[in-house]
Amino acid sequence: MELDSLDCMTSSDVIDDDEILSHSHHQFPSLSKPHGNGDYSNSVVSSAVHPSTTSVHELLECPVCANSMYPPIHQCHSGHTLCSTCKTKAHNQCPTCRQELGDIRCLALEKVAESLELPCKYVTLGCPEILPYYSKLRHESICIFRPHNCPYAGSECSVVGDIPFLVAHLRDDHKVDMHSGCTFNHRYVKSNPQEVENATWMLTVFHCFGQYFCLHFEAFQLGMIPVYMAFLRFMGDEIEARNYSYSLEVGGNGRKIIWEGTPRSIRDSHRKVRDSHDGLIIERNMALLFSGGERKELKLRVMGRIWKEQQNPEGGVCIPTLCS
């Protein structure tokens, strides 16, 4: 599929399926540290924790998979412990001493775990929570300080990290377009608009209000209908994303379509947002009408702006604030 480079105020490149597959061959680390040399492993414990508590926490790590153990905690006749997941895989043989495992619960260790309070493993990223042992795992699955996945679309990138790290990663490794300001005017070009399935244009990242936003534009089949879709994602958590709104406008030949919405957090995957249809969707025939000419080439201009909703202390209503 032949795709043209973009001729726009903030130019981008078009990526087709073959190019997308080639990008996925790039090797990135599966886990990345944020600024401040943070550590995401389960063994992260604040230095403020008493050494005896740390030792007990180590006893609660499964010697096979190194994950924290939760009831039921099993042990063999010699006292070697392991988690229920590893017991299922052990085929009734203790992984430590190779003796028959049996079906013995380590009730004493389960009872000790009930008395423990430990810091969230994302303490080095700023989480202040001290949690009961059995509540810790659930908290960490929803902790707002947990690292984010790379928001790049078009390849399976496994890099994770804090927002400053991911911004640098997008710029240096994915070579995305980086821009400052809360307004934009893009022109997307495609020489063969009859082919629309899973075509992805290069991601654009905007910096405004001290935050980062990702603009996506792509083509795919919505049922039997070929469509183009543009949407914005916020590089942060969902609660923060609700403080912002954005608009997208596309048009031509005296006609236009306007979309307004709230950017989705990058906690939601690119595919989840796309499949929810939460953005500006244009059918191919309408897009070609906006392009003018003989409808043989896509030349679609998408304009947009981002603003922050601020509470009016006098009227109690939200008023938009534009960045300067």
Image (cartoon, helix red, strand yellow):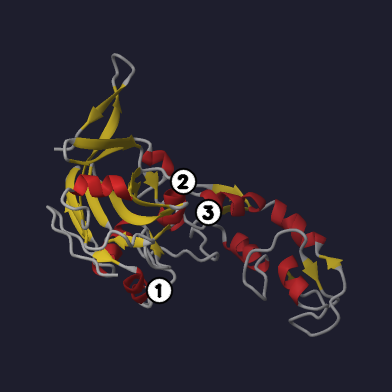
Tell me the number on the disc at residue 276: 2
**Residue at position x 52%, y 49% from top?**
142
Quadrant of the image containing the C terminus: top left
- Taking the image as shown, residue 51 lies to the left or right of residue 239, namely right
Q: Which residue is mark 3?
A: 120
Mark in the foreground, 3 or 1: 1
Disc on res. 136: none
Q: In the rendering, at what x and y percent does residue 170 appear?
A: 29, 63
Secondary structure of residue under mark 1: loop
Residue under the image location 32 percent in, 50 percent down: 284
Q: Position of residue 130 (x, y in %)?
A: 55, 48
Q: CA distance from mark 1 to mark 2?
A: 30 Å
Look at mark 1 in the image and give the residue it sits on.
29
21, above or below 305, in the image: below
Q: Which residue is at a point 71% across and 59% down the rendered structure image?
A: 70
Q: Is residue 232 above or below residue 59?
A: above
